[in-house]
Image (spheres, helix red, strand yellow):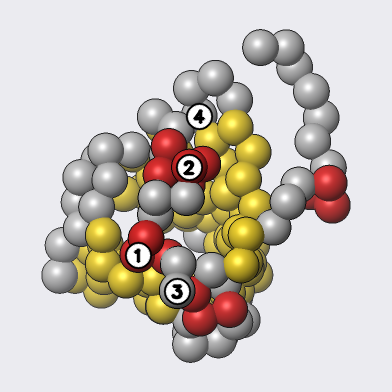
Amino acid sequence: MTYKAVPWNQVPTDELIDGIKRQVVTGEKVMIGRIVFPMGAKVPAHTHESEQLTHVLKGKLRFIVEGNEVIVSEGETLTIPSNLEHSAEALEPTEEIDAFSPIRTDWLDGSDIYLRS
């Protein structure tokens, strides 16, 4: 794979549950998703093999990770190790970036049923 600059305005947007919008850019071994949540939108509890980093650009998210509440605000990054159950709820309108390694193939092939209506 060669290097490239990817403008977000040229990346397709997935419309998910609760009005959540997602854009995805992949490299060879890592992927990022730009996620926009309306206030109150929820991502149901789930697990995945990928290690996850979530950086909140604007807004605030409440995560439940392995039964523990973690509030992540603008400018903060949450690290979630592989295979830990977690969910999220937007406490206010929120924009964030998720990074995953390895790449989440369920996001690419549409098998991420927990995020689709």
Give coordinates of residue 96: x percent, y percent. Answer: 59, 60
Q: Amino acid at mark 4?
A: Val
Point out the tag, 3 or 2, that comes first from the N-terminus: 2
In percent of the image, x 54 and y 35: which residue is there? 31
Looking at the rendered image, the disc whose residue lies closer to the viewer, 1 or 2, is 2
Labelled pair 3, 2 in contact (Cβ < 8 Å)? no
From where the camera sits, is residue 56 visible? yes
Residue that badge 2 annotates: 109
Measure the C-alpha gap from mark 3 to mark 1: 8 Å
Q: Measure the C-alpha gap from mark 1 to mark 4.
A: 21 Å
Hey, what amino acid is under mark 1? Tyr
Q: Residue at x 62, y 45 (%)?
A: 24
Observer-nearest residue: 88 or 103? 103
The mark that comes first in sequence, 2 or 4, is: 4
Mark 3 lies on a secondary structure that is loop
Neighbour class for label 3 at 10 Å: few (<14), some, many (≥20)?
few
Q: Where residue 117 is drawn, which disc sits there?
A: 3
Examine the image and state in which quarter residue 62 appears.
Answer: bottom left
- For label 4, the residue is 30
Check the image and report above or below for 21 versus 11: below
Relative placement, left or right, of 73 versus 34 is left
Q: Earlier in the sequence, mark 1 or mark 4?
A: 4
Indicate which disc, 1 or 2, sits on the residue closer to the N terminus. 2
Task: Give the percent coordinates (x, y) of residue 58.
Answer: 65, 70
